[in-house]
Image (cartoon, helix red, strand yellow):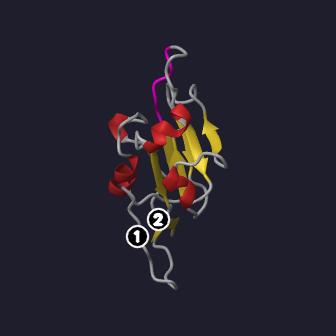
Amino acid sequence: MLRVSVAKHDSHPPKCTRTPKKIVVGGSAKWTFGFDYTDWAFRNSPFYVNDTLVFKYKLPKDNSTHPHSVYLLPNLSSFVTCNLTKAVKVADGKQGGGKGFRFVLNKWKPYYFACGGGDGIHCGLGQMKFYVLPLLRG
């Protein structure tokens, strides 16, 4: 399910003065197959510039599994279709263990995240994708 909110053309993003937070993606579910991350992002918004997203996931036990990863997709179209062709892998299957992989939302722009496991199957069928547009701080 894709949720989109639209602002007026000449409106400015809301500002916040709070300090940056570390947010575990998926909460207690972490980064796992079959969890609706688009819904999670919607329910846990707003996110702010300089917040840190922490991706925690189980490391692969053997070569028969499709390890999780974190990709940054270039645009909404790639996000909707789970097209990883022009995406950038920001974390591989080994970086989500322990304290997890940390990604800082350092700009005011949309960030589109997806798992590349199973050549995009985790993104498409497993709903392992979400996007955020962090708000500016005051």
The residue nearer to you, when weighing 137 against 31, is 31
Residue 10 appears in the figure: yes
Q: Main secondary structure of the magenta part?
A: loop
| Range covered by the magenta-colored residues | 55-61
Q: Position of residue 128 (x, y in %)?
A: 44, 42
Q: In the picture, residue 58 is in which quadrant?
A: top left
Residue drawn at x 34%, y 52% is 39
Callout 1, which amino acid? Ser
Of circles 1 and 2, which is in front? 1
Residue drawn at x 60%, y 55% is 106
Task: For marks 1 and 2, give the CA distance.
Answer: 22 Å
Element marked by disc 2 = loop
* Residue 35 relative to residue 112: left or right: left
Q: Position of residue 3 (x, y in %)?
A: 38, 62
Q: Position of residue 28 (x, y in %)?
A: 33, 35
Q: Position of residue 79 (x, y in %)?
A: 52, 54
Q: Which residue is mark 1?
A: 5
